[in-house]
Amino acid sequence: MNVQATVVGTADLAGVDSDVLVLVLGAAHKVNARGTAAEQLFHAAIKSGDLEPKGGQSLYLHGAQGFSARRVLLVVARDDSVKAFRQAVDGALAALKSRGLKTMAFAALGFGLTDAHAEMLCLSLEHTFYVYRHTKPSAEALRAPAKVQLCVSAEQQASVKTGLRRGHAVAAGVGVAREAANRPGNACTPTWLGEEARRLGREHGLSVKVLDRKEIEKIGMGSFLSVSRGSDEPPRFIIMEYRGGATKAAPVVLVGKGITFDTGGISLKPAPEMDEMKFDMGGAASVLGTMRAIGELKPKLNVVALIPTCENMPSGRATKPGDVVTSLSGQTIEILNTDAEGRLILCDALTYAARYKPAAIVDVATLTGACVIALGHHHAGLFASDDDLAAQLLAASVSAQDPAWRMPLDDEYAEGLKSRFADVANVAGRPGGSITAAKFLHRFVGSTPWAHLDIAGVANKSGAAKGATGRPVGLLTHFLLSRAGR
């Protein structure tokens, strides 16, 4: 979407020519009856009682006297924070999205706009105008504006342009992730994910390899392959490389869980809401989206993305509870529950990641329902073996407005994973289920700084708003950009 930063003084906002001018007022800012035309408009609306000066309130005006814009939408933000600005813009776009407007302009009163505000405008536009249509071509597409103008001062322009560039890339990555995750299991197969990775590689200068079953067997990924045995769909192991740093610089490795449909296998899930198990490749989708964003922004660092992808299905060939498999690391795993399959494909990918001698590894997975119970649908669960890496990811979650919360990783949580018949069991008891899952993965990373993002509660929504969110593309992109900035 074409979003431009245009220098327009506060006194000149009345002259902005657009189908709609959205004016965002900081709630703490006291408008002056003798101020600019924009301030006078707010002052009159507040004085008449048509608009309350508190966050979330808005007033739509058609043909406001003295304004070139055909419509003016007055919106009050709770404060001047990036989060409050995003909420105000989300509300404005929700009110305007069905009007088919060709041009939009946005401006802030009472606070200055930064690169972060500009980025959030791009993300809000992506969120508002995205419509899934792959298997529903009859869905009415929202007509996005052909031009969006962000009115800023001359002092703000350079920073805002930087934010718009980053926001465009992140929004495009979020779109890739949402589209992939929203596709049903018969449209988003491991084979399709491999083809999508190749497409992104061609378009954004990424090196891509997609390994088939025989190649995965040759590597020795016995744990990964044990999950795919019950399905007729062939597994794939996707390797994507972005080389923007020095030739010998250690890369950051991202690992995304790619279960394109999860029945639970022999440990079959209950029928209600099983359709949402198409979202169990949300980690893979977010890694694809992040590589899309990085391919556009081209930071000076090296990034490798690894995506093990398959279906988890029940059949006469499927892995059974009690089976023991040998992972790529050589560790044997007793599979007590075939519905704890994500960790079985991730552990082999984590072991494979060591081949790159990475500076850090971050895996992303819709791993446990226990994380949803612990954190709900706002924060992703963050587990990390390294405090500095954890701090970087938490800082990225704040700057990206993509919240994460650090969870414990004490050794005592691994006690429940002991097995009499293998080196480790794939599940422990119900208490602390997201933590014991992370402790299982921790066994396969060695001394490399490693973090695990459990996104089970944030990768998609249920109910009337059912669909993928594209999280945590923003967090991952900001994390990688911060690494490049170092």
Image (cartoon, grey):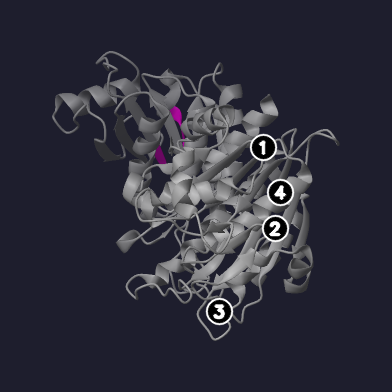
Mark positioned earlier in the residue sequence (1 or 2)? 2
Q: Is residue 171 above or below residue 105?
A: below
Residue ID at (16%, 24%): 47
Instruction: Report the front residue among 391 and 87.
Output: 391
| Badge 1 amino acid | Ser
In the picture of the structure, the residue carrying the numbered disc 2 is 330
Mark 1: few, some, or many residues within 10 Å (few <14, many ≥20)?
Answer: few
Q: CA distance from mark 3 to mark 1?
A: 33 Å
Mark positioned earlier in the residue sequence (4 or 2)? 2
326 in magenta = no
| Badge 2 amino acid | Gly
Residue 221, quarter of the rendered image = bottom right
Mark positioned earlier in the residue sequence (2 or 3)? 3
Instruction: Report the front residue among 167 and 377.
Output: 377
Between marks 4 and 2 in the image, the one whose residue lies nearer the viewer: 2
Residue ID at (55%, 68%): 260
| Badge 3 amino acid | Ala
Q: CA distance from mark 4 to mark 1?
A: 12 Å
Q: Secondary structure at mark 4?
A: helix
What's the magenta region? 15-21
Q: CA distance from mark 2 to mark 3?
A: 21 Å
Q: Percent position (x, y) of residue 432?
A: 37, 48
In the picture of the structure, the residue carrying the numbered disc 1 is 447
18 in magenta = yes
In the picture of the structure, the residue carrying the numbered disc 3 is 318
Residue ID at (45%, 20%): 112
Residue 346, quarter of the rendered image = bottom right
Mark 3: few, some, or many residues within 10 Å (few <14, many ≥20)?
Answer: some
Q: Percent position (x, y) of residue 81?
A: 39, 25
